Image (cartoon, rainbow, N blue to C red):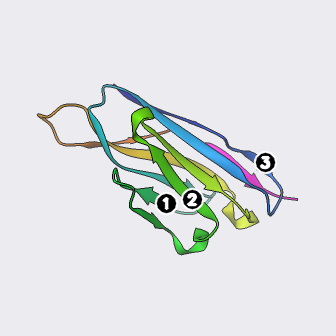
Amino acid sequence: QVQLVESGGGLVQPGGSLRLSCAASGSILSINNMGWYRQAPGKDRELVAAITRGGRTNYVDSVKGRFTISRDNAKNTVYLQMNSLKPEDTAVYYCNADIISNWREPSFSSWGQGTQVTVSS
């Protein structure tokens, strides 16, 4: 069984910063891609940032230059540094990881429970 535990969400003013963390634990041999998604009320969930095991990154255009995704493979942890936050960044942020638990089965997608990020004056 695999569990992803998120932390770091909260309420900040426009222009502020937050650092989200997500640690995976359980039966894990390897983790391929990891990423952060977000979903605002009434909107579809969107991919914000993703990172491969080797460190290649991708970002949605709206956060380029403001957000930075990183990972610590030894700790099975992914981070999202969020700077210059805007009200439109307000959403529930979800951690995702592609997990390999054993070599006899393909990888599966594991999700965190989400953490609320609110940007408001």
Residue at 33 percent across and 25 percent down: it is 1
Q: Does 118 appear in magenta?
A: yes
Whether residue 114 is visible: no
Whether residue 25 is visible: yes
First to last magenta residue range: 113-121
Reading the image, the residue beneath label 2 is: 68
Residue at 45 percent across and 52 percent down: it is 35
Spatial CA span between label 1 and label 2: 8 Å
Which mark is drawn over residue 11?
Answer: 3
Residue at 52 percent across and 55 percent down: it is 69
Is residue 103 or residue 108 the one in the foreground? 103
Which amino acid type is marked by label 2?
A: Thr
Q: Secondary structure at mark 3?
A: strand
Q: Is residue 68 left or right of residue 90?
A: left
> Around disc 2, counting alpha carbons within 10 Å, would you say few (fewer than 14), some (14 to 19), or many (20 or more)?
some
Q: Secondary structure at mark 1?
A: strand
Residue 100, x across and y down, in percent = 25, 38
